[in-house]
Image: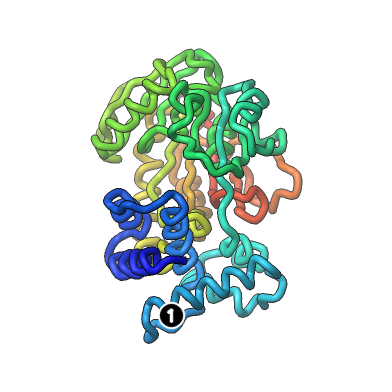
């Protein structure tokens, strides 16, 4: 580990006190003239530091802290079983104990480096795996997902530019698969962001039918348009929506997906810095936002249509509590029957928990209803 790498890591950690660490990391690496190996070392050290921050003494110099974090990382990689469950609780903030079903398995998954997941074009997983190399097929229930373990910059590959795959977490892929859209249907991705799930919905619909994609951010919608052009997705319309009762269209849909803004607890493996910046106040505020989004968007579901709510979080306030409130409030909707997976933890009808320790991706929650009248 070079002095330049250590100095950059210390600078990023100091800046990340008030700014998301992944954004600071991108900024620093963009202007730095580092070798690919050094850039990789910087990124690994930054995420390692925040992964083990609960074990560190904030009064010590930052350089001493990330040396300690690196030692913990090596110890964990050699023998995760050596860490007691009580010790592993240092991986999350204290408030999480009242909000998340904390298990030893979940805590161990948080301290494990995340898997890089790809989504191949439908039916082309084997061919893509051979082209890229360093890929492992996921279980069949995960559709066209691939684990990538190579070192090349995937965004520079000809396969990426040809639209042959997307970099997409397996939990996100599972949500789109559970929506189960059919060719020729009309869907609304109400909180589309930059379009990850919308692209998958289109793939499942064989680019037939129509998808409305909305978001409150014009910047995200602009990025979505670039992504759809590369992926050759044409069966969509983009529109701004602020989440209010004033909907972007009067269209009635076969399915509405509300992949709502959330606290992101399910991404804590991939984004360890967020463990220390998310608060219980954030969780409560987001729970109210999510409930309102569902109730407003529900008006667009046609009789027999689906209403799907998903969040990449695992807090009670943003999952079962939101689903319970909406189930009591939504008129003319009933829980939608969902497929049962092997080793699936029990859940209320029409609900799914996607746990990192089971699927080795982000954690997510999904609730599904069907309009019956």
**Residue ID for mark 1:** 64
The quarter of the picture where residue 124 lies is top right
Residue under the image location 37 percent in, 82 percent down? 61
Can residue 10 be seen in this snapshot?
A: yes
Q: Nearer the viewer, residue 25 or 209?
A: 25
Q: Position of residue 314 (x, y in %)?
A: 52, 57
Residue under the image location 46 percent in, 64 percent down? 45
Q: Nearer the viewer, residue 239 or 54?
A: 54
Q: Position of residue 93 (x, y in %)?
A: 47, 72
Q: Nearer the viewer, residue 101 or 197?
A: 197
Estimate how packed mark 1 is, as few (under 14), some (14 to 19) or many (20 or more) residues with alpha carbons within 10 Å: few
Residue under the image location 60 percent in, 60 percent down? 112
Can residue 281 be seen in this snapshot?
A: no
The quarter of the picture where residue 217 lies is top left
Lateral position of residue 336 relative to residue 242, left or right = right
Residue under the image location 41 percent in, 35 percent down? 298
Please, is residue 263 above or below residue 214 in the view? below
Give the residue furthest to the right: 342
Figure coloring? rainbow
The quarter of the picture where residue 198 lies is top left
Q: Could you say whether the residue bearing mark 1 is in a helix, strand or loop? A: helix
Please, is residue 287 above or below residue 74 in the view? above
Please, is residue 209 above or below residue 253 in the view? above
Q: Position of residue 332 (x, y in %)?
A: 49, 34
């Amino acid at each position: 580990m070079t002095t330049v790498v250590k100095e950059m890591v210390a600078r990023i950690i100091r800046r990340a006190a008030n700014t998301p660490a992944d954004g600071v990391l991108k900024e620093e690496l963009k202007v730095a003239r580092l070798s690919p190996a050094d850039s990789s070392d910087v990124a690994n050290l930054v995420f390692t530091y925040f992964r083990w921050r609960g074990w560190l003494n904030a009064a010590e110099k930052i350089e001493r802290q990330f040396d300690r974090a690196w030692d913990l990382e090596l110890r964990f990689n050699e023998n995760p079983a050596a860490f007691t469950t009580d010790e592993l609780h240092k991986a999350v903030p204290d408030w999480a104990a009242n909000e998340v079903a904390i298990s030893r398995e979940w805590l161990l998954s948080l301290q494990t480096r995340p898997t890089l997941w790809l989504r191949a074009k439908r039916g082309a997983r084997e061919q893509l795996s051979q082209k890229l190399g360093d890929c492992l097929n996921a279980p069949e229930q995960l559709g066209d997902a691939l684990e990538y373990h190579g070192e090349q910059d995937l965004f520079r590959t000809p396969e990426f530019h040809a639209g042959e795959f997307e970099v997409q977490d397996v939990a996100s892929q599972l949500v789109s698969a559970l929506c189960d859209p059919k060719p020729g249907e009309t869907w609304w991705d109400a909180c589309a962001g930059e379009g990850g799930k919308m692209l998958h919905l289109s793939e499942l619909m064989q680019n037939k039918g129509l998808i409305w994609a909305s978001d409150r951010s014009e910047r995200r919608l602009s990025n979505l348009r670039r992504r759809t052009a590369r992926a050759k997705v044409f069966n969509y319309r983009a529109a701004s929506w602020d989440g209010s009762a004033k909907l972007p269209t009067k269209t009635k849909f076969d399915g509405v997906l509300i992949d709502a803004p959330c606290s992101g607890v399910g991404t804590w493996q991939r984004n360890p810095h967020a463990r220390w910046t998310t608060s219980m106040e954030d969780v409560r505020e987001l729970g109210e936002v999510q409930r309102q989004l569902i109730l407003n968007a529900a008006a667009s579901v046609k009789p027999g249509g689906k209403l799907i709510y998903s969040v990449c979080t695992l807090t009670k306030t943003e999952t079962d509590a939101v689903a319970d409130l909406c189930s009591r409030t939504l008129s003319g909707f009933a829980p939608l029957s969902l497929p049962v997976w092997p080793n699936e933890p029990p859940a209320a009808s029409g609900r799914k928990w996607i746990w990192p320790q089971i699927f080795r991706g982000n954690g997510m929650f999904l609730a599904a209803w069907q309009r019956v009248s």
